[in-house]
Image (cartoon, rainbow, N blue to C red):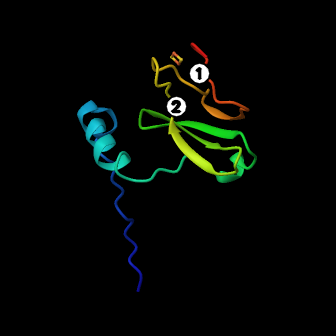
Amino acid sequence: MLSRTKPMLTNLDARFYVDPDLFARERQNIFRRRWQMLGPVARIKERGDYLAVDVAGWKLFALRGRDGILRGFHNVCRHRGARLLAEGTGTCGTLRCPYHH
Ligand code: FES
């Protein structure tokens, strides 16, 4: 005979959603150490297609190069830290920093 009692649902304590120290630990211990999905590969099928996202505060992008290979990068210029690509998907012929070019 099946039990007629309803399963008890519990939520995480509210601090798990708002505590900056917990978020920092989560970033370091989960997001930084594991592979993260940026999005469906079908959105970056052609050469020059990119997908730029924010993963736990890190600006990242995947870009399909002229050679057809998909590569991942931090979405930050090495010179002064400007963001290279707008968040979302698009196509770029040449990857060039919008700040100082
Ligand atoms: S910040 Fe990108 S070239 Fe200076």
Residue 49: quarter of image: top right
Residue position marked by numbered label 1 in the rendering: 97
Q: Nearer the viewer, residue 5 or 81?
A: 81
- Residue count near mark 1 (Cα–Cα under 10 Å), binned few <14, some 14–19, many ≥20: some
Residue 92 seen in the figure = yes
Question: Which comes before the other along the chain, label 2 or label 1?
Answer: 2
Q: Is residue 47 left or right of residue 33?
A: right
Left or right: 51, with 82 as reference point:
right
- Residue reaching furthest bottom? 1
Which secondary structure, mark 1? loop
Residue depicted at 41% across the width and 86% down the height:
1
Query: What is the number of the mark on residue 49?
Result: none
Going by the numbered disc 1, the residue's amino acid type is Cys
To which quarter of the image does residue 17 belong?
top left
Q: Residue at x 57, y 14 (%)?
A: 99
Q: Nearer the viewer, residue 13 or 94?
A: 94
Q: Position of residue 33 (x, y in %)?
A: 34, 50
Left of 59 or right of it: where is 84?
A: right
In the rendered image, the vertical position of residue 59 relative to residue 6, given as above or below? above
Give residue 93's position: percent from left, percent from top.
73, 32
Q: Which residue is mark 2?
A: 75
Q: Which image quadrant: the C terminus?
A: top right
